[in-house]
Image (spheres, rainbow, N blue to C red):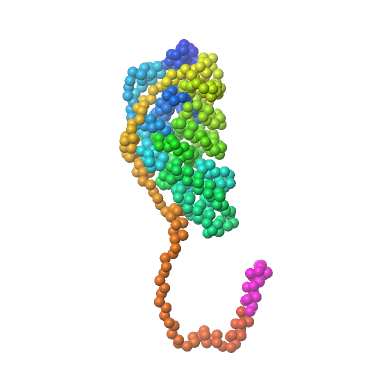
């Protein structure tokens, strides 16, 4: 078996600068000398962590985040179920952890990590994060709102007009106020020459905006806007893990999608081209990735696909965590160089089709019958293939994964809230800022001007004709002025009708 497991492990990273996943399993036994590693330089080639509920994929995500942090790479994680907050506490040793450490060649030590807890909007337990309407821009907001091309064009016109008038669009009431004005008689006059906003299109946009507000957008859009540089921090040489709480948003996928789209777009815009790096600048983990794509419009999917393709050139890696690989569009799946596939279930015909499709995404191997292996994996085991040090796919390895070194469980809302309030991000983002923006400016413009009291009128004194009146009373002067007035009148008339010769 050692020769076979060594053969399977061939092609994986063999030295430092790698993320260690675990050890090769063959015939039910793990070989701690045959290690499965992902080269750190390949962590920005994106990846997939998939598997049925209860197979250990969230703990795999937790372990990867830990090792990235130890390597100095900041991590952003979406915590939908609320069970990743244990990253902030050291783990507890047990017989199972000790046995797994022996199987995987791991010198396991309980370790806590530097975590900053974030929440979308103000209703969560973490530090609230926000974005402005202007920061999203018309194209991105139109895709999130599900607008068609005509409505998207109209939204762009609305943004253009507001920008030209110096009206900041910071929150949803700002955008609503501008749309309402531009469909009024006064607003229609403002748009003459550059287009118009039809009442029907405005109604569609306002209804979509109302739906987004109902999903939490009203408390999310505003200031202070999140600075993406605050997600790329290190502390004592370790990458800070930014844990985005989404437990209160499971029934509000549009808001989560909105934030994701903006955040990736901001990173793409802010970060310079990085080329091939020894380690990524930042790695994203998106748990419950199906929330990104369920019910999403084609435009939204296209945006995600384009971002995944391009953002790795900025040194950012993206890992999707979901139950089935088929949850992701093929165009996204084809960009994921690392695959960590936990056990699948094949109880229904649809499950069997998904299993067959999953098998086809892996390189062929003489060591495993993948269709049987994928339904036989134990908890904390996975079928793995990654990009090796040369960039080529590695052999498929049945892998027993290492245990996380932090606490495998939630630390509770009170502990999260206390940690958030003690973080340096709290002072910067906790307090909502509602400065003067489009809503207040337009309200001030439409308010009636206060009436000014009339100044008392003084009766003029009759001191007789002054010098000018005396001159104008002269008969010769009157005759001259009549002739001059007639000539001036003819000149003005020619100018108004365009008959005057141009110089």
Q: Residue at x 49, y 17 (%)?
A: 373
Using the rendered image of the protein, determine whether residue 44 is visible from the camera's viewpoint.
Answer: no
Is residue 490 one of those drawn in magenta?
yes
Whole-percent x, y for residue 133 in the image: 47, 47
| In-image side of 74 versus 392 (left or right) | left
Q: Where, quadrant-wise, is the C terminus in this rendering?
A: bottom right
Q: Residue at x 52, y 85 (%)?
A: 469
Please tell me whether residue 324 is drawn above or below residue 430 in the rendered image: above
Q: Residue at x 33, y 20 (%)?
A: 94
Q: Nearer the viewer, residue 345 or 400?
A: 345
Whole-percent x, y for residue 455 in the image: 41, 74
Whole-percent x, y for residue 23 in the image: 44, 18
Please tell me whether residue 480 is drawn above or below residue 132 in the rendered image: below
Using the rendered image of the protein, determine whether residue 431 is visible from the camera's viewpoint.
Answer: yes
Main SS of residues in magenta: helix
Q: Tell me how many marks there are.
A: 0
Please tell me whether residue 17 is drawn above or below residue 497 in the rendered image: above
Is residue 435 one of those drawn in magenta?
no
Residue sitting at the far front: 348
Residue sitting at the far top: 1
Q: Residue at x 40, y 31 (%)?
A: 81
Whole-percent x, y for residue 232 in the image: 42, 37
- For the record, the magenta segment spans 486-503
Q: Nearer the viewer, residue 303 or 209?
A: 209
């Amino acid at each position: 078996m050692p020769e076979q497991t060594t053969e399977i492990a061939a092609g994986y990273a063999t030295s430092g600068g790698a993320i260690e996943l675990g050890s090769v399993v063959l015939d039910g036994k793990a070989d701690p000398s045959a290690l499965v590693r992902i080269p750190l330089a390949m962590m920005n080639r994106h990846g997939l962590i998939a598997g049925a509920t209860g197979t250990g994929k969230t703990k795999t995500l937790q372990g990867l985040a830990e090792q990235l942090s130890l390597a100095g790479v900041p991590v952003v994680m979406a915590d939908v179920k609320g069970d990743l907050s244990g990253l902030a506490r050291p783990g507890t040793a047990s017989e199972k952890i000790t046995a797994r450490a022996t199987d995987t060649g791991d010198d396991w030590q309980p370790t806590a990590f530097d975590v900053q807890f974030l929440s979308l909007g103000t209703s969560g337990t973490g530090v609230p994060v926000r974005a402005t309407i202007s920061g999203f821009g018309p194209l991105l907001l139109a895709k999130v709102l599900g607008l068609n091309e005509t409505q998207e064009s109209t939204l762009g016109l609305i943004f253009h007009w507001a920008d030209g008038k110096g009206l900041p669009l910071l929150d949803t009431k700002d955008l609503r106020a501008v749309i309402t004005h531009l469909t009024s008689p006064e607003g229609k006059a403002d748009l003459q020459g550059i287009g118009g906003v039809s009442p029907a299109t405005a109604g569609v946009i306002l209804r979509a905006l109302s739906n987004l507000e109902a999903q939490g957008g009203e408390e999310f859009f505003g200031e202070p806007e999140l600075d993406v540089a605050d997600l790329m921090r290190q502390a004592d040489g370790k990458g800070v893990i930014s844990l985005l709480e989404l437990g209160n948003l499971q029934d509000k996928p549009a808001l989560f999608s909105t934030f994701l789209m903006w955040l990736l777009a901001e990173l793409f815009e802010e970060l310079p081209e990085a080329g091939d790096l020894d380690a990524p600048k930042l790695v994203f983990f998106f748990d419950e990735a199906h929330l990104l794509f369920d019910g999403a419009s084609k435009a939204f999917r296209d945006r995600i696909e384009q971002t995944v393709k391009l953002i790795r050139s900025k040194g950012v890696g993206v890992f999707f965590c979901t139950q089935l690989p088929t949850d992701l569009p093929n165009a996204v799946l084809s960009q994921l160089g690392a695959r960590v596939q936990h056990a699948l279930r094949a109880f229904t015909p649809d499950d069997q089709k998904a299993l067959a499709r999953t098998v086809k995404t892996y390189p062929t191997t003489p060591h495993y019958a993948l269709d049987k292996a994928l339904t036989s994996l134990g908890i904390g085991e996975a079928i793995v293939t990654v990009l090796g040090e040369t960039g080529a796919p590695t052999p498929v390895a049945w892998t027993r994964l290492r245990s996380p070194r932090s606490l495998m469980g939630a630390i509770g809302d009170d502990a999260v809230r206390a940690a958030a309030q003690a973080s340096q991000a709290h002072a910067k983002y906790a307090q909502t800022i509602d400065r003067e923006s489009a809503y207040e400016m337009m309200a001030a413009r439409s308010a009636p001007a206060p009436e000014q009291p009339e100044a008392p009128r003084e009766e003029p004194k009759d001191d007789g004709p002054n010098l000018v009146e005396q001159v104008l009373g002269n008969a010769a002067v009157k005759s001259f002025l009549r002739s001059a007035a007639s000539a001036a009148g003819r000149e003005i008339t020619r100018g108004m009708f365009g008959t005057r010769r141009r110089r």
